[in-house]
């Protein structure tokens, strides 16, 4: 059996230090509940000395989340340590995380301390922390640019003073995997008894590689964040570490207790809170992580997903593989998308539509559900259609929208207000359809350049426990969102009314 490593999630602390990712106490509590469900072992909730809001956040998370350890950060200074200890008072399993830089450059230019003074400050800080909280972690900030002999001395001294976990941060993302593995291997041997923890930043794009190399070298705790958010280029991404250990665990020699099926929903919840979505090609949780456009790949995926996927979308909580229709797509993907939309064609008709899909994609890059249904031109294709809409918004008005849709030939309309024009339009669509769908995800991007760019909207919705997705495009973002939403509803209806492909061939 592989040893189980501790996942120390610092999304709410180091992740929050990412520009644009600041969170309120209520948002931190909501995310902490999800991270607890996800199966992380420790949640670092904040840095109490930083602000009154941070004190409230740590206190609220500590009081609400009882099933995992809750950590708070402090510099090696009495006021910081006392503030962290106080904020953690209500925690069921508190961890006080104290840090002090050890590299020559930080000691000289930032702290203006001699190595001897810093060593003394670290030991005194750990003793004070230990008098408040039984579990204390010490981080040697900028460890990877610290002289090895001095780093070992500080870690040994803080361990003897009461720190049980010794963290070795690659604070500036400078290390390479073979160097970091060598450093961690030496410390595991030279400071026996301590839990050696790793904390990698992604300045050179190797934070996850460094963390995994360190685990192979004997590290037993990994500090990481959802979506890899964090200072500058971010921290090691939790979902990538978890999936590397799930897919390649026997090679790496470790496992985690994380429920991988909750990775995508957790990533989406964080993006919903911060408004920052991972880049589309981000491993595991990016929108394209399970998307295929090339016809050869699409054919392979439809025949057997293992041809081009090393993990199933379901294993990370993604509902389905996305086959993007573009100029590289083939008839198998076109037929599959049409079936999902409730349209069945003969093989000859599929060939003809595929040729037209390629023509259209040459002109406009992607072919959306709406375009596909237009190409088919079939009456059966259009069970739900956007007839027209109107939306008002501005700095001094309540965003309002009126939407008219055609459902099975019948016209229906409704109006609604929302917290923005897209929200109002989707609420009006719900009212017109007589439905109340849960919107799981909505992403927008410009598929062409310039101020008059074409916006593409992708949505994922849940209705009656089943998820479906839809796409829409327009130079008007609200129209694109409505088209995507109605397409997701039509897909959900079609899935309800028809047997799935798997059932049919069984
Ligand atoms: O990157 C870093 O060194 C840190 C420490 C506070 C652990 O975030
Ligand atoms: Zn950090």
Image: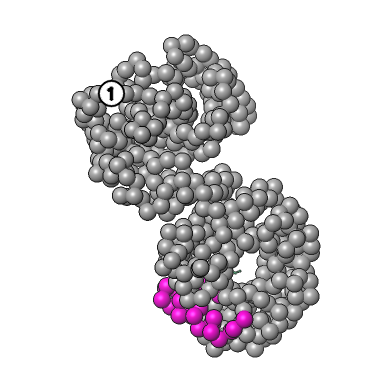
Residue 102, located in which quarter of the rendered image? bottom right
Task: Spot the residue most to the front.
Answer: 506
Q: Which residues are magenta?
A: 168-193
Along the horizontal axis of the image, is 337 left or right of 54? Answer: left
Which is nearer the eye, 334 or 394?
334
Identify the residue shown where x is 59% and y is 53%: 38
Residue 345 in the image, given as x and y percentages of width and height: 28, 23
Residue 247, located in which quarter of the rendered image? bottom left
Residue 124 in the image, given as x and y percentages of width and height: 73, 81
Along the horizontal axis of the image, is 96 left or right of 105? Answer: right
Which is nearer the eye, 43 or 297?
297
Residue 34, can we see it?
A: yes
For residue 301, above or below residue 56:
above
Residue 57, can we see it?
A: no
Q: Tell me the quadrant of the picture where the C terminus can be found.
A: top left
Q: In the rendered structure, does residue 173 fall within the stretch colored magenta?
A: yes
SS at badge 1: loop
| Display colour scheme | one colour
Q: In the rendered structure, does residue 128 fall within the stretch colored magenta?
A: no
**Quadrant holding ligand 1?**
bottom right
Which residue is denoted by mark 1 in the rendering?
345
Identify the residue shown where x is 57% and y is 59%: 257
Identify the residue shown where x is 43% and y is 66%: 250
For residue 270, above or below residue 357:
below
Residue 393 in the image, given as x and y percentages of width and height: 56, 27
Residue 108, located in which quarter of the rendered image? bottom right
Identify the residue shown where x is 37% and y is 44%: 291
The response on whether ligand 2 sits within 8 Å of label 1 is: no
| Disc 1 crowd, CA 10 A, few/some/many (<14, 14-19, 20+) | few
Task: Spot the residue most to the top.
Answer: 410
Q: What is the number of callouts on the image? A: 1
Residue 145 in the image, given as x and y percentages of width and height: 50, 79
């Amino acid at each position: 059996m592989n040893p189980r490593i501790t996942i120390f999630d610092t999304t709410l602390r180091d992740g929050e230090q990412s520009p644009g990712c600041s969170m309120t106490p209520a948002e931190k509590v909501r995310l902490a509940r999800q991270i607890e469900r996800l199966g992380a072992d420790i949640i670092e909730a904040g840095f109490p000395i930083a602000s009154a809001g941070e004190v409230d956040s740590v206190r609220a998370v500590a009081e609400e989340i009882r099933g995992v350890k809750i950590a708070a950060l402090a510099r090696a200074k009495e006021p910081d340590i006392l503030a962290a200890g106080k904020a953690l008072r209500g925690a069921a399993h508190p961890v006080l995380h104290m840090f002090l830089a050890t590299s020559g450059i930080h000691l000289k230019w930032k702290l203006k301390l001699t190595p001897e003074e810093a060593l003394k400050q670290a030991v005194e800080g750990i003793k004070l922390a230990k008098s408040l909280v039984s579990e204390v972690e010490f981080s040697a900030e900028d460890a990877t640019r610290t002289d090895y002999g001095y780093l070992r001395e500080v870690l040994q001294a803080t361990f003897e003073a009461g720190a049980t976990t010794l963290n070795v941060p690659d604070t500036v993302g400078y290390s390479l995997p073979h160097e970091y593995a060598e450093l961690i291997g030496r410390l595991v041997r030279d400071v026996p008894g301590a839990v050696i923890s790793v904390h990698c930043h992604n300045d050179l794009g190797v934070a996850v590689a460094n963390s995994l190399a360190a685990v192979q070298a004997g590290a037993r705790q990994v500090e990481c964040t959802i979506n890899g958010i964090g200072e500058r280029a971010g921290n090691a991404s939790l979902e990538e570490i978890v999936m590397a250990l799930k897919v390649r665990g026997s090679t790496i020699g470790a496992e985690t207790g994380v429920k991988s099926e909750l990775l995508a929903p957790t990533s989406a919840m964080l993006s919903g809170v911060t408004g920052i979505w991972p880049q589309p090609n981000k491993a595991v949780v990016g929108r394209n992580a399970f998307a295929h456009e090339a016809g050869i790949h699409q054919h392979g995926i439809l025949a057997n997903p293992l041809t081009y996927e090393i993990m199933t979308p379901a294993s990370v909580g993604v509902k389905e593989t996305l086959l993007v229709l573009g100029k590289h797509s083939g008839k198998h993907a076109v037929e599959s998308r049409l079936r999902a939309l409730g349209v069945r064609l003969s093989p000859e008709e599929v060939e003809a539509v595929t040729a037209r899909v390629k023509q259209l994609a040459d002109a406009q890059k992607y072919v959306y559900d709406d375009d596909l249904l237009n190409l088919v031109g079939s009456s059966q294709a259009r069970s739900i259609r956007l007839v027209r809409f109107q939306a008002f918004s501005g700095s001094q008005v309540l965003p309002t929208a009126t939407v008219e849709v055609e459902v099975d030939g019948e016209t229906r309309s409704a109006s609604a207000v929302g917290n923005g024009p897209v929200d109002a339009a989707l609420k009006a669509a719900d009212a017109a359809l007589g439905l109340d769908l849960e919107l799981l995800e909505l992403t927008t991007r410009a598929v062409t350049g310039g101020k008059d760019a074409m916006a593409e909207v992708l949505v994922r919705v849940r209705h009656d426990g089943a998820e479906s997705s839809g796409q829409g495009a327009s130079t008007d973002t609200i129209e694109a969102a409505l088209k995507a939403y109605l397409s997701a509803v039509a897909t959900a209806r079609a899935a309800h009314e028809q047997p799935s492909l798997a059932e049919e061939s069984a």
